[in-house]
Image: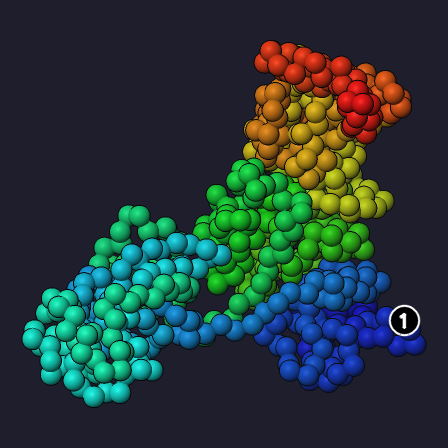
Protein backbone atom coordinates (compact mmCIF):
# COMPACT_ATOMS: atom_id res chain seq x y z
CA UNK A 1 0.00 0.00 0.00
CA UNK A 2 1.12 3.57 -0.68
CA UNK A 3 1.80 5.60 2.47
CA UNK A 4 -0.97 8.08 3.29
CA UNK A 5 1.45 10.94 2.68
CA UNK A 6 4.02 9.86 0.14
CA UNK A 7 7.09 12.08 0.30
CA UNK A 8 7.99 13.51 -3.08
CA UNK A 9 11.47 12.28 -3.99
CA UNK A 10 11.43 9.28 -1.62
CA UNK A 11 13.82 6.40 -2.27
CA UNK A 12 10.94 3.93 -2.29
CA UNK A 13 9.45 2.98 -5.63
CA UNK A 14 6.01 1.65 -6.58
CA UNK A 15 6.41 -2.03 -7.54
CA UNK A 16 3.75 -4.23 -9.16
CA UNK A 17 3.58 -7.77 -7.76
CA UNK A 18 1.21 -10.67 -8.14
CA UNK A 19 0.35 -12.63 -5.04
CA UNK A 20 -2.31 -15.32 -4.72
CA UNK A 21 -3.64 -14.49 -8.18
CA UNK A 22 -4.10 -10.77 -7.43
CA UNK A 23 -2.09 -7.72 -8.40
CA UNK A 24 -0.79 -5.61 -5.55
CA UNK A 25 1.30 -2.45 -5.44
CA UNK A 26 4.11 -2.33 -2.91
CA UNK A 27 6.59 0.36 -1.95
CA UNK A 28 10.14 -0.91 -1.94
CA UNK A 29 13.53 0.73 -2.02
CA UNK A 30 15.06 0.42 -5.44
CA UNK A 31 17.98 -1.77 -4.37
CA UNK A 32 15.56 -4.25 -2.74
CA UNK A 33 13.11 -4.70 -5.63
CA UNK A 34 12.63 -8.49 -6.07
CA UNK A 35 13.25 -10.20 -9.40
CA UNK A 36 9.69 -11.60 -9.32
CA UNK A 37 8.26 -8.08 -9.59
CA UNK A 38 6.27 -7.46 -12.77
CA UNK A 39 7.47 -3.85 -13.12
CA UNK A 40 8.56 -0.91 -11.04
CA UNK A 41 8.30 2.85 -11.26
CA UNK A 42 11.53 4.04 -12.84
CA UNK A 43 13.23 5.28 -15.97
CA UNK A 44 14.88 3.12 -18.63
CA UNK A 45 18.29 4.26 -17.38
CA UNK A 46 17.59 2.23 -14.24
CA UNK A 47 16.84 -1.06 -16.01
CA UNK A 48 18.99 -4.07 -15.18
CA UNK A 49 19.68 -7.21 -17.18
CA UNK A 50 17.75 -9.59 -14.89
CA UNK A 51 15.40 -7.29 -13.01
CA UNK A 52 11.81 -6.30 -13.78
CA UNK A 53 11.15 -3.68 -16.47
CA UNK A 54 10.88 -0.03 -15.41
CA UNK A 55 7.80 2.10 -16.09
CA UNK A 56 8.59 5.81 -16.42
CA UNK A 57 4.86 6.64 -16.60
CA UNK A 58 4.23 4.92 -13.27
CA UNK A 59 7.01 6.86 -11.54
CA UNK A 60 6.03 10.20 -13.07
CA UNK A 61 2.45 9.89 -11.82
CA UNK A 62 3.10 8.51 -8.34
CA UNK A 63 2.02 11.68 -6.53
CA UNK A 64 -1.05 12.34 -8.74
CA UNK A 65 -3.03 9.12 -8.10
CA UNK A 66 -4.30 7.50 -4.91
CA UNK A 67 -3.27 3.92 -4.16
CA UNK A 68 -6.29 2.32 -5.85
CA UNK A 69 -5.90 4.25 -9.10
CA UNK A 70 -2.14 3.93 -9.10
CA UNK A 71 -2.63 0.16 -9.08
CA UNK A 72 -4.87 0.52 -12.15
CA UNK A 73 -2.12 2.52 -13.85
CA UNK A 74 0.48 -0.11 -12.96
CA UNK A 75 -1.71 -2.87 -14.46
CA UNK A 76 -2.30 -0.79 -17.58
CA UNK A 77 1.45 -0.24 -17.92
CA UNK A 78 2.07 -3.97 -17.55
CA UNK A 79 -0.43 -4.73 -20.34
CA UNK A 80 1.12 -2.01 -22.51
CA UNK A 81 4.55 -3.62 -22.22
CA UNK A 82 3.21 -7.10 -22.93
CA UNK A 83 0.89 -6.22 -25.84
CA UNK A 84 3.25 -4.09 -27.89
CA UNK A 85 6.08 -6.21 -29.24
CA UNK A 86 8.55 -4.95 -31.82
CA UNK A 87 11.84 -6.00 -33.34
CA UNK A 88 15.17 -4.45 -32.34
CA UNK A 89 18.60 -5.44 -33.65
CA UNK A 90 22.01 -4.09 -34.60
CA UNK A 91 23.17 -3.41 -38.15
CA UNK A 92 26.83 -2.80 -38.98
CA UNK A 93 26.87 -0.71 -42.14
CA UNK A 94 30.64 -1.13 -42.43
CA UNK A 95 29.90 -4.68 -43.57
CA UNK A 96 27.37 -3.57 -46.21
CA UNK A 97 28.55 -3.24 -49.85
CA UNK A 98 29.21 0.30 -51.09
CA UNK A 99 29.56 1.14 -54.78
CA UNK A 100 32.26 3.81 -55.25
CA UNK A 101 32.03 5.38 -58.72
CA UNK A 102 34.47 7.71 -60.45
CA UNK A 103 35.54 8.78 -63.94
CA UNK A 104 39.12 9.40 -62.82
CA UNK A 105 41.25 6.32 -62.06
CA UNK A 106 43.81 8.19 -59.97
CA UNK A 107 41.13 9.77 -57.78
CA UNK A 108 39.50 6.36 -57.28
CA UNK A 109 42.84 4.74 -56.41
CA UNK A 110 43.67 7.43 -53.87
CA UNK A 111 40.24 7.21 -52.23
CA UNK A 112 40.51 3.43 -51.88
CA UNK A 113 44.05 3.68 -50.51
CA UNK A 114 42.93 6.13 -47.82
CA UNK A 115 39.46 4.87 -46.91
CA UNK A 116 39.07 1.42 -48.45
CA UNK A 117 39.77 -0.39 -45.19
CA UNK A 118 36.91 1.30 -43.36
CA UNK A 119 34.06 -0.33 -45.26
CA UNK A 120 33.21 -2.83 -48.00
CA UNK A 121 33.99 -0.69 -51.05
CA UNK A 122 33.55 -1.96 -54.59
CA UNK A 123 35.12 0.38 -57.18
CA UNK A 124 33.52 1.24 -60.51
CA UNK A 125 35.86 3.15 -62.80
CA UNK A 126 34.03 4.69 -65.76
CA UNK A 127 37.33 5.19 -67.62
CA UNK A 128 39.28 2.15 -68.81
CA UNK A 129 42.30 1.50 -66.61
CA UNK A 130 44.21 -1.74 -65.94
CA UNK A 131 43.83 -1.22 -62.19
CA UNK A 132 40.06 -1.69 -62.36
CA UNK A 133 37.65 -4.10 -64.05
CA UNK A 134 36.25 -2.96 -67.40
CA UNK A 135 32.49 -2.37 -67.26
CA UNK A 136 30.03 -1.33 -69.94
CA UNK A 137 26.31 -0.50 -70.12
CA UNK A 138 26.13 0.42 -66.44
CA UNK A 139 22.50 0.92 -65.32
CA UNK A 140 21.52 2.10 -61.85
CA UNK A 141 18.02 1.51 -60.45
CA UNK A 142 16.39 1.69 -57.03
CA UNK A 143 14.58 -1.36 -55.70
CA UNK A 144 13.31 -2.13 -52.20
CA UNK A 145 15.26 0.82 -50.83
CA UNK A 146 18.58 -0.37 -52.24
CA UNK A 147 20.55 0.54 -55.32
CA UNK A 148 20.82 -2.15 -57.96
CA UNK A 149 23.70 -1.89 -60.43
CA UNK A 150 23.50 -3.97 -63.58
CA UNK A 151 26.36 -3.96 -66.09
CA UNK A 152 28.44 -5.97 -68.51
CA UNK A 153 31.79 -7.02 -67.06
CA UNK A 154 34.52 -7.59 -69.64
CA UNK A 155 35.92 -11.03 -68.77
CA UNK A 156 38.38 -12.05 -71.53
CA UNK A 157 40.25 -14.48 -69.30
CA UNK A 158 38.82 -17.80 -68.17
CA UNK A 159 40.95 -18.30 -65.10
CA UNK A 160 40.12 -21.98 -64.72
CA UNK A 161 41.75 -22.66 -68.11
CA UNK A 162 44.78 -20.36 -67.83
CA UNK A 163 48.08 -22.11 -66.99
CA UNK A 164 49.93 -18.83 -66.36
CA UNK A 165 52.45 -19.69 -69.06
CA UNK A 166 53.00 -16.01 -69.93
CA UNK A 167 53.01 -16.67 -73.70
CA UNK A 168 50.30 -14.08 -74.42
CA UNK A 169 52.32 -11.31 -72.78
CA UNK A 170 55.46 -12.12 -74.73
CA UNK A 171 53.57 -12.32 -78.05
CA UNK A 172 51.58 -9.06 -77.70
CA UNK A 173 52.99 -6.53 -80.22
CA UNK A 174 51.48 -3.59 -78.25
CA UNK A 175 52.75 -4.82 -74.86
CA UNK A 176 49.16 -4.52 -73.65
CA UNK A 177 49.17 -7.73 -71.57
CA UNK A 178 50.65 -7.19 -68.14
CA UNK A 179 51.53 -9.72 -65.45
CA UNK A 180 48.51 -11.46 -64.09
CA UNK A 181 47.54 -11.60 -66.91
CA UNK A 182 45.87 -8.18 -67.11
CA UNK A 183 44.93 -6.54 -70.42
CA UNK A 184 45.54 -2.80 -70.65
CA UNK A 185 42.82 -1.55 -72.99
CA UNK A 186 44.63 1.75 -73.41
CA UNK A 187 47.24 -0.11 -75.47
CA UNK A 188 45.31 -3.07 -76.87
CA UNK A 189 44.32 -2.76 -80.56
CA UNK A 190 42.34 -6.02 -80.56
CA UNK A 191 44.61 -7.78 -83.03
CA UNK A 192 43.60 -10.99 -81.19
CA UNK A 193 47.03 -12.56 -81.58
CA UNK A 194 46.97 -13.54 -77.90
CA UNK A 195 43.58 -15.14 -78.35
CA UNK A 196 44.70 -17.19 -81.37
CA UNK A 197 48.02 -18.35 -79.91
CA UNK A 198 46.87 -19.24 -76.40
CA UNK A 199 47.52 -23.00 -76.05
CA UNK A 200 44.77 -23.39 -73.44
CA UNK A 201 42.18 -21.29 -75.34
CA UNK A 202 41.75 -19.30 -72.12
CA UNK A 203 41.37 -15.91 -73.85
CA UNK A 204 38.25 -14.54 -75.56
CA UNK A 205 38.30 -10.78 -76.09
CA UNK A 206 34.57 -10.77 -76.90
CA UNK A 207 33.55 -12.40 -73.62
CA UNK A 208 31.30 -10.43 -71.21
CA UNK A 209 29.41 -11.42 -68.09
CA UNK A 210 26.07 -9.86 -67.17
CA UNK A 211 26.19 -8.77 -63.53
CA UNK A 212 23.48 -7.43 -61.21
CA UNK A 213 24.35 -6.40 -57.65
CA UNK A 214 22.65 -4.60 -54.78
CA UNK A 215 24.42 -1.94 -52.73
CA UNK A 216 23.59 -0.38 -49.38
CA UNK A 217 25.18 2.95 -50.37
CA UNK A 218 26.11 4.64 -53.63
CA UNK A 219 29.07 7.05 -53.53
CA UNK A 220 30.08 9.25 -56.47
CA UNK A 221 33.51 10.89 -56.27
CA UNK A 222 32.42 13.41 -58.90
CA UNK A 223 29.11 15.18 -59.43
CA UNK A 224 26.10 12.85 -59.29
CA UNK A 225 24.56 12.43 -62.77
CA UNK A 226 21.00 13.83 -62.88
CA UNK A 227 19.51 10.56 -64.18
CA UNK A 228 20.47 8.65 -61.02
CA UNK A 229 17.34 7.92 -58.90
CA UNK A 230 17.51 9.90 -55.68
CA UNK A 231 17.44 8.20 -52.31
CA UNK A 232 18.25 10.29 -49.28
CA UNK A 233 20.63 8.61 -46.87
CA UNK A 234 21.80 6.12 -49.52
CA UNK A 235 23.23 8.34 -52.28
CA UNK A 236 26.23 10.58 -51.71
CA UNK A 237 28.39 12.92 -53.78
CA UNK A 238 31.85 14.42 -53.21
CA UNK A 239 30.43 17.23 -51.04
CA UNK A 240 28.70 14.76 -48.69
CA UNK A 241 31.60 12.58 -47.57
CA UNK A 242 31.27 13.69 -43.96
CA UNK A 243 27.61 12.65 -43.88
CA UNK A 244 28.49 9.37 -45.63
CA UNK A 245 31.10 8.48 -43.01
CA UNK A 246 28.64 9.33 -40.24
CA UNK A 247 26.43 6.54 -41.63
CA UNK A 248 29.17 3.96 -41.13
CA UNK A 249 29.13 2.04 -37.88
CA UNK A 250 27.16 -0.40 -35.77
CA UNK A 251 23.64 1.03 -35.36
CA UNK A 252 20.69 -0.19 -33.32
CA UNK A 253 17.62 -0.56 -35.55
CA UNK A 254 14.19 -0.54 -33.93
CA UNK A 255 11.35 -1.46 -36.24
CA UNK A 256 8.66 0.81 -34.85
CA UNK A 257 6.40 0.73 -37.93
CA UNK A 258 3.88 -1.97 -38.70
CA UNK A 259 2.48 -1.94 -42.23
CA UNK A 260 -0.68 -3.68 -43.49
CA UNK A 261 -1.02 -3.55 -47.24
CA UNK A 262 -4.53 -5.04 -47.15
CA UNK A 263 -5.98 -1.81 -45.73
CA UNK A 264 -3.60 0.68 -47.37
CA UNK A 265 -5.32 2.93 -49.91
CA UNK A 266 -2.28 3.26 -52.15
CA UNK A 267 -3.07 0.66 -54.81
CA UNK A 268 0.30 -0.60 -56.01
CA UNK A 269 -0.98 -2.35 -59.13
CA UNK A 270 -2.42 0.94 -60.38
CA UNK A 271 0.35 3.16 -59.03
CA UNK A 272 -1.99 5.70 -57.44
CA UNK A 273 -4.00 6.33 -54.30
CA UNK A 274 -3.18 7.75 -50.87
CA UNK A 275 0.42 9.02 -50.65
CA UNK A 276 0.32 11.08 -47.45
CA UNK A 277 2.98 9.11 -45.58
CA UNK A 278 5.34 8.90 -48.54
CA UNK A 279 5.12 12.59 -49.44
CA UNK A 280 5.63 13.88 -45.90
CA UNK A 281 8.33 11.63 -44.42
CA UNK A 282 11.10 14.07 -43.37
CA UNK A 283 13.78 11.36 -43.60
CA UNK A 284 12.61 9.94 -46.96
CA UNK A 285 12.50 6.54 -45.28
CA UNK A 286 9.38 5.51 -47.21
CA UNK A 287 9.45 4.49 -50.86
CA UNK A 288 6.65 3.49 -53.18
CA UNK A 289 7.69 0.69 -55.51
CA UNK A 290 5.46 -2.36 -55.95
CA UNK A 291 4.01 -1.26 -52.62
CA UNK A 292 5.13 0.78 -49.64
CA UNK A 293 8.72 0.00 -48.62
CA UNK A 294 10.02 1.09 -45.21
CA UNK A 295 13.75 1.78 -44.97
CA UNK A 296 14.30 0.87 -41.32
CA UNK A 297 17.86 2.22 -41.41
CA UNK A 298 16.75 5.73 -42.41
CA UNK A 299 13.62 5.78 -40.22
CA UNK A 300 14.13 7.91 -37.11
CA UNK A 301 10.97 6.68 -35.36
CA UNK A 302 9.32 10.11 -35.34
CA UNK A 303 5.88 8.56 -35.96
CA UNK A 304 4.76 11.32 -38.32
CA UNK A 305 3.73 8.83 -41.01
CA UNK A 306 1.54 6.96 -38.51
CA UNK A 307 -0.24 10.17 -37.56
CA UNK A 308 -0.76 10.93 -41.25
CA UNK A 309 -2.10 7.49 -42.17
CA UNK A 310 -5.93 7.68 -42.28
CA UNK A 311 -6.54 3.94 -42.58
CA UNK A 312 -4.37 2.39 -39.87
CA UNK A 313 -2.22 0.63 -42.46
CA UNK A 314 0.73 2.17 -40.62
CA UNK A 315 0.81 1.80 -36.86
CA UNK A 316 3.38 2.53 -34.17
CA UNK A 317 4.43 -0.86 -32.77
CA UNK A 318 5.68 0.29 -29.33
CA UNK A 319 2.16 1.59 -28.61
CA UNK A 320 -0.36 0.48 -31.25
CA UNK A 321 -3.65 2.33 -31.50
CA UNK A 322 -5.78 -0.63 -30.37
CA UNK A 323 -3.59 -0.99 -27.29
CA UNK A 324 -3.73 2.79 -26.71
CA UNK A 325 -7.55 2.78 -26.58
CA UNK A 326 -7.57 -0.20 -24.24
CA UNK A 327 -4.96 1.53 -22.06
CA UNK A 328 -6.98 4.74 -21.69
CA UNK A 329 -10.13 2.78 -20.92
CA UNK A 330 -8.50 1.45 -17.75
CA UNK A 331 -7.48 4.85 -16.34
CA UNK A 332 -9.36 7.48 -14.32
CA UNK A 333 -8.50 10.70 -16.18
CA UNK A 334 -11.48 12.97 -15.57
CA UNK A 335 -10.44 16.53 -14.78
CA UNK A 336 -6.78 15.94 -15.53
CA UNK A 337 -4.26 17.74 -17.69
CA UNK A 338 -2.38 15.22 -19.84
CA UNK A 339 1.21 15.68 -20.96
CA UNK A 340 2.51 13.34 -23.69
CA UNK A 341 6.22 13.28 -24.45
CA UNK A 342 9.31 11.19 -25.01
CA UNK A 343 10.85 9.60 -21.96
CA UNK A 344 14.07 11.60 -22.25
CA UNK A 345 12.20 14.92 -22.20
CA UNK A 346 9.93 13.92 -19.34
CA UNK A 347 12.96 12.65 -17.42
CA UNK A 348 14.53 16.09 -17.76
CA UNK A 349 11.32 17.78 -16.64
CA UNK A 350 11.08 15.39 -13.66
CA UNK A 351 14.26 17.01 -12.37
CA UNK A 352 12.96 20.54 -12.98
CA UNK A 353 11.68 22.73 -10.14
CA UNK A 354 8.46 23.26 -12.14
CA UNK A 355 7.54 19.57 -12.01
CA UNK A 356 4.38 19.45 -9.84
CA UNK A 357 4.38 17.62 -6.54
CA UNK A 358 0.61 17.16 -6.64
CA UNK A 359 -2.42 18.01 -8.75
CA UNK A 360 -4.68 16.63 -11.47
CA UNK A 361 -2.01 15.64 -13.97
CA UNK A 362 -1.14 12.62 -16.05
CA UNK A 363 2.29 12.35 -17.66
CA UNK A 364 2.36 9.73 -20.42
CA UNK A 365 5.65 8.61 -21.93
CA UNK A 366 5.31 8.07 -25.67
CA UNK A 367 8.38 7.95 -27.90
CA UNK A 368 6.49 9.31 -30.92
CA UNK A 369 3.89 11.94 -29.97
CA UNK A 370 3.55 12.77 -33.68
CA UNK A 371 2.04 9.30 -34.19
CA UNK A 372 -1.10 10.34 -32.32
CA UNK A 373 -4.07 10.74 -34.65
CA UNK A 374 -7.44 12.44 -34.31
CA UNK A 375 -8.94 9.31 -32.74
CA UNK A 376 -6.34 9.20 -29.98
CA UNK A 377 -6.49 12.94 -29.27
CA UNK A 378 -10.27 12.90 -28.91
CA UNK A 379 -10.08 9.72 -26.84
CA UNK A 380 -8.37 11.79 -24.16
CA UNK A 381 -11.27 14.26 -24.14
CA UNK A 382 -13.81 11.41 -24.06
CA UNK A 383 -12.11 10.23 -20.86
CA UNK A 384 -12.76 13.61 -19.23
CA UNK A 385 -9.34 15.18 -19.82
CA UNK A 386 -9.39 18.99 -19.69
CA UNK A 387 -6.24 19.67 -21.71
CA UNK A 388 -3.75 17.66 -23.77
CA UNK A 389 -0.18 18.97 -24.10
CA UNK A 390 2.13 17.34 -26.64
CA UNK A 391 5.88 17.80 -26.42
CA UNK A 392 5.97 18.04 -30.19
CA UNK A 393 6.07 20.66 -32.92
CA UNK A 394 4.89 18.79 -36.01
CA UNK A 395 1.89 16.64 -35.12
CA UNK A 396 -0.17 16.62 -38.33
CA UNK A 397 -3.52 16.26 -36.58
CA UNK A 398 -3.19 18.89 -33.88
CA UNK A 399 -4.49 21.81 -35.96
CA UNK A 400 -7.55 19.89 -37.16
CA UNK A 401 -8.22 18.62 -33.64
CA UNK A 402 -8.15 22.22 -32.36
CA UNK A 403 -10.47 23.39 -35.16
CA UNK A 404 -12.98 20.62 -34.47
CA UNK A 405 -12.81 21.29 -30.72
CA UNK A 406 -13.29 25.01 -31.33
CA UNK A 407 -16.50 24.34 -33.26
CA UNK A 408 -17.74 21.86 -30.64
CA UNK A 409 -16.55 23.29 -27.31
CA UNK A 410 -15.70 26.91 -28.18
CA UNK A 411 -12.14 26.41 -26.90
CA UNK A 412 -9.03 24.55 -27.93
CA UNK A 413 -7.87 21.88 -25.47
CA UNK A 414 -4.84 20.71 -27.49
CA UNK A 415 -1.41 22.33 -27.28
CA UNK A 416 1.99 21.54 -28.75
CA UNK A 417 4.90 23.02 -26.83
CA UNK A 418 8.62 22.61 -26.41
CA UNK A 419 10.08 21.27 -23.17
CA UNK A 420 11.28 24.78 -22.27
CA UNK A 421 7.71 26.14 -22.37
CA UNK A 422 5.97 23.21 -20.70
CA UNK A 423 5.94 24.83 -17.26
CA UNK A 424 4.03 27.86 -18.62
CA UNK A 425 1.22 25.68 -20.05
CA UNK A 426 0.94 23.21 -17.22
CA UNK A 427 -0.88 25.15 -14.56
CA UNK A 428 -3.75 26.78 -16.46
CA UNK A 429 -6.82 24.77 -15.48
CA UNK A 430 -10.11 24.22 -17.34
CA UNK A 431 -13.23 22.25 -16.53
CA UNK A 432 -13.70 18.89 -18.29
CA UNK A 433 -15.88 18.83 -21.39
CA UNK A 434 -17.57 15.52 -20.66
CA UNK A 435 -16.66 11.94 -19.78
CA UNK A 436 -17.87 8.78 -21.47
CA UNK A 437 -18.41 5.74 -19.23
CA UNK A 438 -16.32 3.76 -21.70
CA UNK A 439 -14.58 4.37 -25.00
CA UNK A 440 -16.08 2.66 -28.08
CA UNK A 441 -14.72 -0.76 -29.01
CA UNK A 442 -11.82 -0.53 -31.44
CA UNK A 443 -12.58 -1.97 -34.89
CA UNK A 444 -10.09 -0.10 -37.03
CA UNK A 445 -8.79 3.46 -37.15
CA UNK A 446 -11.43 5.22 -39.22
CA UNK A 447 -14.40 3.23 -37.92
CA UNK A 448 -13.35 3.96 -34.34
CA UNK A 449 -12.96 7.66 -35.13
CA UNK A 450 -16.39 7.73 -36.74
CA UNK A 451 -18.05 6.17 -33.68
CA UNK A 452 -16.19 8.36 -31.20
CA UNK A 453 -16.65 11.57 -33.15
CA UNK A 454 -20.39 10.99 -33.52
CA UNK A 455 -20.81 10.54 -29.74
CA UNK A 456 -19.00 13.84 -29.13
CA UNK A 457 -20.72 15.70 -31.99
CA UNK A 458 -24.16 14.52 -30.89
CA UNK A 459 -23.53 15.55 -27.28
CA UNK A 460 -22.57 19.10 -28.26
CA UNK A 461 -25.50 20.01 -30.48
CA UNK A 462 -24.50 18.58 -33.89
CA UNK A 463 -22.96 21.76 -35.34
CA UNK A 464 -22.35 21.80 -39.11
CA UNK A 465 -18.91 22.89 -40.32
CA UNK A 466 -16.28 22.16 -42.96
CA UNK A 467 -12.51 21.71 -42.61
CA UNK A 468 -9.83 21.54 -45.30
CA UNK A 469 -8.28 18.08 -44.95
CA UNK A 470 -6.44 15.76 -47.29
CA UNK A 471 -7.56 12.57 -45.53
CA UNK A 472 -11.34 13.05 -45.65
CA UNK A 473 -13.51 13.25 -48.74
CA UNK A 474 -17.00 13.25 -50.16
CA UNK A 475 -17.80 11.28 -53.31
CA UNK A 476 -20.42 12.69 -55.67
CA UNK A 477 -22.07 10.69 -58.46
CA UNK A 478 -23.39 11.65 -61.88
CA UNK A 479 -26.43 9.38 -61.92
CA UNK A 480 -26.80 9.73 -65.71
CA UNK A 481 -23.37 8.18 -66.29
CA UNK A 482 -23.36 5.46 -63.64
CA UNK A 483 -24.25 1.95 -64.83
CA UNK A 484 -23.82 0.36 -61.39
CA UNK A 485 -20.96 -1.76 -62.69
CA UNK A 486 -19.50 -1.51 -59.15
CA UNK A 487 -15.90 -1.27 -60.38
CA UNK A 488 -15.42 1.47 -57.78
CA UNK A 489 -15.85 -1.06 -54.96
CA UNK A 490 -12.92 -3.24 -55.94
CA UNK A 491 -10.21 -1.15 -54.29
CA UNK A 492 -12.11 0.66 -51.55
CA UNK A 493 -10.51 -1.17 -48.65
CA UNK A 494 -12.19 1.05 -46.06
CA UNK A 495 -15.68 0.11 -47.30
CA UNK A 496 -16.59 3.75 -47.75
CA UNK A 497 -18.21 2.49 -50.96
CA UNK A 498 -20.22 -0.71 -50.71
CA UNK A 499 -23.02 -2.54 -52.45
CA UNK A 500 -26.48 -3.24 -51.11
CA UNK A 501 -27.11 -6.54 -52.89
CA UNK A 502 -30.76 -6.81 -51.87
CA UNK A 503 -31.70 -3.36 -53.18
CA UNK A 504 -29.20 -3.15 -56.05
CA UNK A 505 -27.78 0.07 -54.69
CA UNK A 506 -24.35 1.73 -54.45
CA UNK A 507 -23.80 2.95 -50.88
CA UNK A 508 -21.41 5.68 -49.73
CA UNK A 509 -20.38 6.22 -46.10
CA UNK A 510 -18.59 9.63 -45.94
CA UNK A 511 -17.04 9.11 -42.49
CA UNK A 512 -15.02 6.16 -43.82
CA UNK A 513 -13.71 7.92 -46.95
CA UNK A 514 -9.99 8.76 -46.80
CA UNK A 515 -9.98 10.77 -50.05
CA UNK A 516 -7.52 8.47 -51.83
CA UNK A 517 -9.24 9.17 -55.17
CA UNK A 518 -8.95 5.59 -56.43
CA UNK A 519 -12.67 5.17 -57.10
CA UNK A 520 -12.74 8.36 -59.15
CA UNK A 521 -9.83 7.20 -61.32
CA UNK A 522 -10.96 3.64 -61.97
CA UNK A 523 -14.63 4.44 -62.76
CA UNK A 524 -14.99 3.44 -66.44
CA UNK A 525 -17.86 5.87 -66.97
CA UNK A 526 -16.15 8.83 -65.21
CA UNK A 527 -19.28 9.15 -63.11
CA UNK A 528 -17.58 9.86 -59.75
CA UNK A 529 -16.12 13.10 -58.45
CA UNK A 530 -14.19 13.46 -55.18
CA UNK A 531 -14.28 16.57 -53.01
CA UNK A 532 -11.53 16.61 -50.39
CA UNK A 533 -12.30 17.91 -46.93
CA UNK A 534 -14.09 17.11 -43.68
CA UNK A 535 -17.75 18.08 -44.08
CA UNK A 536 -19.30 17.51 -40.68
CA UNK A 537 -23.07 17.22 -40.80
CA UNK A 538 -25.68 14.49 -40.19
CA UNK A 539 -25.09 12.80 -43.54
CA UNK A 540 -21.37 12.47 -42.75
CA UNK A 541 -22.17 9.62 -40.36
CA UNK A 542 -24.85 7.94 -42.50
CA UNK A 543 -24.87 5.38 -45.27
CA UNK A 544 -26.02 7.27 -48.36
CA UNK A 545 -27.54 5.75 -51.48
CA UNK A 546 -25.59 7.10 -54.47
CA UNK A 547 -27.32 5.03 -57.15
CA UNK A 548 -29.98 2.35 -57.40
CA UNK A 549 -31.42 0.31 -60.26
CA UNK A 550 -33.79 -2.51 -61.07
CA UNK A 551 -32.42 -6.04 -61.40
CA UNK A 552 -32.30 -7.94 -64.68
CA UNK A 553 -33.76 -11.44 -64.51
CA UNK A 554 -32.66 -14.20 -66.85
CA UNK A 555 -35.46 -14.87 -69.35
CA UNK A 556 -34.81 -18.60 -69.09
CA UNK A 557 -33.99 -19.46 -65.46
CA UNK A 558 -35.09 -16.29 -63.65
CA UNK A 559 -31.73 -15.71 -61.96
CA UNK A 560 -30.65 -12.11 -61.24
CA UNK A 561 -27.48 -11.42 -63.22
CA UNK A 562 -27.17 -7.65 -63.50
CA UNK A 563 -28.92 -4.32 -63.56
CA UNK A 564 -30.96 -2.72 -66.30
CA UNK A 565 -28.54 0.19 -66.63
CA UNK A 566 -25.51 -2.02 -67.19
CA UNK A 567 -27.42 -4.24 -69.61
CA UNK A 568 -28.63 -1.25 -71.61
CA UNK A 569 -25.11 0.24 -71.75
CA UNK A 570 -23.72 -2.99 -73.24
CA UNK A 571 -26.62 -3.18 -75.69
CA UNK A 572 -26.00 0.41 -76.87
CA UNK A 573 -22.25 -0.16 -77.23
CA UNK A 574 -22.74 -3.23 -79.42
CA UNK A 575 -25.45 -1.57 -81.49
CA UNK A 576 -23.30 1.52 -82.13
CA UNK A 577 -20.61 -0.70 -83.67
CA UNK A 578 -23.09 -1.88 -86.28
CA UNK A 579 -22.11 -5.47 -85.56
CA UNK A 580 -23.29 -8.35 -83.41
CA UNK A 581 -26.92 -7.31 -83.89
CA UNK A 582 -27.86 -10.94 -84.34
CA UNK A 583 -26.75 -11.77 -80.79
CA UNK A 584 -28.23 -8.82 -78.94
CA UNK A 585 -31.09 -11.00 -77.79
CA UNK A 586 -28.56 -13.12 -75.83
CA UNK A 587 -28.11 -10.23 -73.41
CA UNK A 588 -31.43 -11.22 -71.87
CA UNK A 589 -29.92 -14.44 -70.54
CA UNK A 590 -27.48 -15.14 -67.69
CA UNK A 591 -23.99 -16.43 -68.50
CA UNK A 592 -25.08 -20.09 -68.10
CA UNK A 593 -28.29 -19.91 -70.10
CA UNK A 594 -26.58 -17.84 -72.80
CA UNK A 595 -24.38 -20.83 -73.66
CA UNK A 596 -27.40 -23.13 -73.81
CA UNK A 597 -29.21 -20.74 -76.15
CA UNK A 598 -26.22 -20.61 -78.50
CA UNK A 599 -25.98 -24.41 -78.76
CA UNK A 600 -29.72 -24.91 -79.17
CA UNK A 601 -29.86 -22.40 -82.03
CA UNK A 602 -26.86 -24.02 -83.67
CA UNK A 603 -28.67 -27.37 -83.73
Q: Is residue 224 visible?
A: yes
Secondary element at tag 1: strand
**Residue 10 percent across, percent down from the top left:** 69, 74
Q: Is residue 414 visible?
A: no
The quadrant the C terminus occupies is: top right
Horizontal relation, residue 512 to residue 178: left or right: right
Q: Residue at x 64, y 82 (%)?
A: 49
**Residue 495 percent across, percent down from the top left:** 72, 35
Farthest residue, direction front: 603
Question: Which is nearer the eye, 366 or 487?
Answer: 487
The colour scheme is rainbow
Horizontal relation, residue 558 to residue 332: left or right: right
Residue for badge 1: 22
Q: Residue at x 26, y 51 (%)?
A: 225
**Residue 468 percent across, percent down from the top left:** 56, 28
**Residue 347 percent across, percent down from the top left:** 58, 65
Number of marks in picture: 1
**Is residue 517 positioned above or below 390 on the image?**
above
Crowding around mark 1 (Cα neighbors within 10 Å: few <14, some 14 to 19, many 20+) is: few
**Is residue 43 positioned above or below 541 on the image?**
below
Horizontal relation, residue 444 to residue 307: left or right: right
The quarter of the picture where residue 554 lies is top right
**Is residue 288 positioned above or below 573 on the image?**
below
Q: Residue at x 65, y 20 (%)?
A: 476
Question: Which is nearer the eye, 453 or 344?
Answer: 453
The quarter of the picture where residue 537 lies is top right
The quadrant the N terminus occupies is: bottom right
Horizontal relation, residue 57 to residue 268: left or right: right
Farthest residue, direction left: 173
Q: Residue at x 36, y 63 (%)?
A: 210
Amino acid sequence: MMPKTWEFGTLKRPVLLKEQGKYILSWIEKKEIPAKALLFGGFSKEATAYGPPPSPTLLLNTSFFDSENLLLLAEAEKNRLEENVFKSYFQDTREKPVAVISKRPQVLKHFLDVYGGLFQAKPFCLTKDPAFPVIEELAITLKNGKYCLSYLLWSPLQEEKCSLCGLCGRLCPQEAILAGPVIDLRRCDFCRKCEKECPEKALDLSRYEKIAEEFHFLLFLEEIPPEIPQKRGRLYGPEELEEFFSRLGNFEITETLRFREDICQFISRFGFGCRLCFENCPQKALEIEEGLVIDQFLCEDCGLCVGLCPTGALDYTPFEERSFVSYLNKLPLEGRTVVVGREEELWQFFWNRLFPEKGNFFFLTHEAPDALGLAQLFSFLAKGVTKVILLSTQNYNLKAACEIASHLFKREPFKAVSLEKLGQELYSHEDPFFCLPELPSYQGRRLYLKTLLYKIWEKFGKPHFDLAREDFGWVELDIKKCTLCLACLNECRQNALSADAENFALIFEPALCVACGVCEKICPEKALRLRKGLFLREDFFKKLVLAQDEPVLCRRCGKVFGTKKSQERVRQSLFSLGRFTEILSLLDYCEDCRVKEIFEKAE
